[in-house]
Amino acid sequence: MESENSSGMCAKQTMAADGIVRLSKIEVYPQYLGEYLKLAVEVGEISLRTEPGVLTMYAVQDKENACLVTILETYASKEAYEKHIASAHFQKYKQGTLHMVKSLQLCDQTPLPPANKINNFIE
């Protein structure tokens, strides 16, 4: 079992050279928005609390169109990302939301140098 800090989150890995920084841009059908958000929050919280290689899951909704959701995701390595998408909680989210998602764009990003670090936390 992974060690936890005082917030109940597992100890995190550091970002490796093959780490992933991604913006997931999701458009949800309006009739599924509430259900989608519940599943998205659940998978994000479980991932952050239990997966050492999942560094960030920060989701936001567009102020003009609540059906547009963007998630900043960071993974310590390609291996950490592959473990994440194979996890039971991610598969529950993915399979459970397929019919809810109108469009999905996965946009990989390059962090700005030199010491651009993201602080991760759950309140």
Image: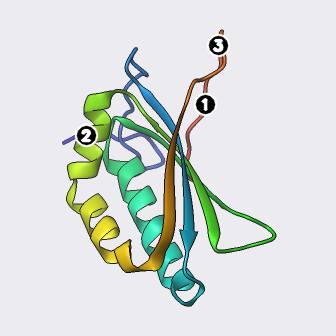
Residue under label 3: 115
Residue ID for mark 2: 82
The extreme top residue here reads: 114
Q: Residue furthest right?
A: 64
Helix, strand or loop status at disc 1: loop
**Mark drawn on residue 78:** none
Give the spatial CA distance, label 1 vs label 3.
10 Å
At 60% from the left and 85% from the top, the residue drawn is 30
Q: Choose between 3 and 22: the one closer to the eye.
A: 22
Residue 51 falls in image quadrant: top left
Which structural element holds mark 2?
helix
Q: Residue flagged by tag 3: what amino acid is it?
A: Ala
**Callout 2 environment at 10 Å: few (<14), some (14 to 19), or many (20+)?**
few
Distance Cα–Cα, label 2 vs label 3? 26 Å
Q: In the image, what residue occupies the spot 39% across and 62% down?
A: 43
Task: From this view, report whether residue 97 is shown above or below residue 121.
Answer: below
Real-space Cα separation, disc 1 to disc 2, in angstroms? 21 Å
Residue 110 in the image: x percent, y percent? 57, 24
- Counting from the top left corner in percent of width and height, residue 60 is at 66, 59
Kindly identify the amino acid type of the residue bearing the numbered disc 1: Ile
* Residue 38 position in % (x across, y down): 48, 76
- On residue 118, which mark appears? 1
Query: Would you place residue 85 above or below residue 26 in this image?
Result: above
Displayed quadrant of residue 33: bottom right
The quadrant in which the C terminus is found is bottom right
- Would you place residue 33 above or below residue 87 in this image? below
Instruction: Residue type at mark 2: give it.
Output: Glu
Return the residue nearer the eye: 13 or 106: 106
Q: Nearer the viewer, mark 2 or mark 3?
A: 2
Q: Nearer the viewer, mark 1 or mark 2?
A: 2
- Residue 91 placement, left or right of 67: left
Residue 68's spot in the image, x, y percent?
A: 64, 67
